[in-house]
Amino acid sequence: MSGPSVQLLAHTAEPERTVALAARLCYSARGVADLAAGLSEAEVESLLEKLLAMGHLSALEHAQFTLGVEGISRACSHQLVRHRVASYSQQSQRYVALRRVQAVVPPSIEDRPELAAAFRRALEQAWALYGRLVDEGVPAEDARYLLPNACETKLVVSMNARELRHFFSLRLCRRAQWEVRALARAMLGAVEAVAPRLFRGAGPGCLAGSCPEGAYSCGQAAEVRRELAEGVRRDP
Amino acid sequence: MSGPSVQLLAHTAEPERTVALAARLCYSARGVADLAAGLSEAEVESLLEKLLAMGHLSALEHAQFTLGVEGISRACSHQLVRHRVASYSQQSQRYVALRRVQAVVPPSIEDRPELAAAFRRALEQAWALYGRLVDEGVPAEDARYLLPNACETKLVVSMNARELRHFFSLRLCRRAQWEVRALARAMLGAVEAVAPRLFRGAGPGCLAGSCPEGAYSCGQAAEVRRELAEGVRRDP
Amino acid sequence: MSGPSVQLLAHTAEPERTVALAARLCYSARGVADLAAGLSEAEVESLLEKLLAMGHLSALEHAQFTLGVEGISRACSHQLVRHRVASYSQQSQRYVALRRVQAVVPPSIEDRPELAAAFRRALEQAWALYGRLVDEGVPAEDARYLLPNACETKLVVSMNARELRHFFSLRLCRRAQWEVRALARAMLGAVEAVAPRLFRGAGPGCLAGSCPEGAYSCGQAAEVRRELAEGVRRDP
Amino acid sequence: MSGPSVQLLAHTAEPERTVALAARLCYSARGVADLAAGLSEAEVESLLEKLLAMGHLSALEHAQFTLGVEGISRACSHQLVRHRVASYSQQSQRYVALRRVQAVVPPSIEDRPELAAAFRRALEQAWALYGRLVDEGVPAEDARYLLPNACETKLVVSMNARELRHFFSLRLCRRAQWEVRALARAMLGAVEAVAPRLFRGAGPGCLAGSCPEGAYSCGQAAEVRRELAEGVRRDP
């Protein structure tokens, strides 16, 4: 139950420079090769800062990141794949038979020994019957109807930097569920490591001063800020 | 276990005429009002036929259909929401506590009494423990980790006619899973009833003569054709 | 030079009720038919208000609007079609020969008689040579390379209410170009007429109190508010 | 008039291996790191071949390519940006004043000296008046209404391999316009150079044996095949 594991598998080469170059082209009479050659590190820095300050995020789409995600429940992947500006390849429960218990136990259950024990017994029973069904010739794609939302899944997900920022703004909010928040923190840690300037300030609106949830705000902006500073930036 | 229930909730007014008008505009010097006034039923018919014959499907996007879907499993909804050119509002397992067993039993299990009985017992146990967790203060959003893929869900889905045809081409194929195929048949029945000419010939590539699955073809084009003729067109 | 003409051609039936029903389903244990039957006008009102206040806009996607747009320049349509969550059918300059001058003259030129006269002469000359090229057998798709950005175009565009609100937030901003702003005002007028509650408060961020452009803000929120109140709501 | 210039600016690292890894994950019980370590070149080759043969193209979305495009007309860029599953940063005619004639002359005009001369004179006149307008204080964003479709533009475009294949299927067809076909050939040359196996057989349906245009087919599949073999593969 160690939580989501996220691994950066691949990404657009020089993501920050690529975004800055694209942004620069929009406002310049010079050619692509010329612009590419003449772009200093300081200009990349200042262009990215300006884009984020103005909310002109379309150039961020030129940087795409591909992540391997493991150790999340199907409940969590169901939330993840609802983000439509992204690409997913998910381990299939139709084609892959899942012989041993691999499941996520929510902390609210883990914290209460009696309930946790009952929960684990239920997992054992579900997998035992699943195995029996498969052994008796039921296709894996049908036997899986028995498997719980807790069942672990794996996927490869690609998102561009703009969509990642949007994802972080929703899923790092304290109103998001704990598991998808943990996933978002791990994803932010992975992409920040290679493109810190594309993800500066990424997170819910409250980080920048105003919560968009209005009357439904959690009122805990300070805690969100602290969590991100500690949980992601130091120890992804 | 009566299978997916699909209800057409709303759609673009005069979907066939709207599509034909848009297609006409592309190739005409006349104005919108003028074109709209002068479009006869015969022209609508012939324009739609031409669009489908040429595969020029972009005008079909102007007709959107909103469907209420019930009686499908979470396994099935997970497949449905992977279609990204569509809009979904799904009953939340985070906010709605599901007190009684509502689940889909796969036919391959239903057909074998002993396995079916074991499957149903497992469902009863899962829901009993779920109820206990909720009663003891575990949030519904965590208790649901216990609920199986078989658990029924409801959603409202909107797709335009082009995306619906794409959905049908994949999900009415015999390589698709039985439940999403049943859903696709029910969806086709619902939209055909109000816009038969937009969905003429909708289904997998084999209906039009060539299976795109190549070496992986099921080789059963005739049966697909028969199923659609009987299952959808007569008795949705 | 009467500006953009926008005509609502079709839309999802009962757009406000459809959106409210979808939003309701997410948080209810009841079935679709049951919900649909029991939804009062007051509930529709209060649900829509709540969605907008919380920024939970996904249910707004279930309402799609199809508009006929005329009297805009190709410069303007180039900006419009950059919005990707939408469907377009545009009058083709490849297939439709444009024999007479039909063009948009920017106000900054119109206001200066000498420049306006020179501008119009240039238009006449462009169309004259265009006509000669077509008469001498050059395909319309090549002769059009001569036609200016000012050249008028027509298109049918479909967008859902969520994307329309996003479009309005960008294109009703005073930093947007005058022509696409005029188009946005006309589009807002057309959709507001049938679904006022879906478009309440639509416009740039400054309408709701905070300009997202930061240091690049025009600082004229009050004027934007006045323009919208007068220009759209009274006299679309 | 040397035609479109396309430069590969950046792309997902190891695009073929990344796609193969994602595809593999769907059908394997093994973890991401384990799969990544164990993937031989021969397996990459055979996985990609299988994906293309079956038309299972979703894994191709994990490889994104960023291209710098120059030397195309605004007529051509208008066609390009209609592809919605892509990201664009285009040189702005609002912010960049275009002082000298830079324009694309269609071959059908270039080939006829008298028409070509008249065409060039018209370009000179357009740019001369454009310069005068800007000099007299008309904003560049308004003066550009005079500039013709022939006017050259620059842009940075990012597309994933699946969308690129779709783009090539439409735009390498002989029914597409000559300029966007030339652009497509140059784009295919650029991406093939780094990921030949992702773009094997890319092009219109006729390359693989069946033209989807039906009665509207050009009937020249052999020529399309020859052009691609000569024009792209040998000398991009």
Image (tube, coloured by chain):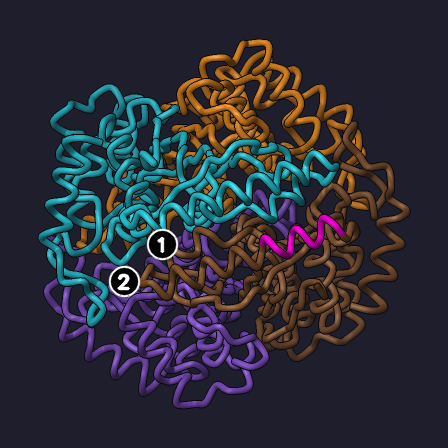
Chain colours: A orange, B purple, C brown, D cyan
Q: Residue at point 47% right, 62% down?
A: B152
The residue type indicated by label 1 comes to Tyr
Q: Position of residue C6 (x, y in %)?
A: 66, 68
Q: Are marks 2 and 1 in contact (CB under 8 Å)?
A: yes
Q: Is residue C120 magenta?
A: yes
Image position, residue B157 (x, y; %): 51, 64
Residue under mark 1: which chain is it in?
A
Inspect the image, locate mark 2, and give the three-letter code of the amino acid beneath it: Ile
For label 2, the crowd category at 10 Å Cα-Cα, with few meaning under 14, some 14 to 19 and many 20 or more, is: many
Residue depth check, mark 2 versus mark 1: number of the one nearer the observer: 1
In the rendered structure, the answer to whether residue D215 lies left or right of residue A148 reads left
Residue D11 position in % (x across, y down): 36, 26
Which portion, as a residue range, is magenta? C114-122
Alpha carbons under labels 2 and 1: distance apart: 10 Å
Answer with left or right where residue D207 lies relative to residue C186: left
Q: Residues within 10 Å of mark 1 (few under 14, many from 20)?
A: many
Q: Residue at x 38, y 72 (%)?
A: B3
Relative horizontal placement of residue A40, taking residue D175 as reference (left or right): right
Where residue A198 appears, x then y in whole percent? 57, 23
- Pointer 2 chain: B
Residue beneath disc 2: B109
Q: Residue at x 29, y 60 (%)?
A: B170
Looking at the rendered structure, the secondary structure element under dot 2 is: helix
Residue that label 1 marks:
A145
Asked which secondary structure carries label 1, the reply is: helix
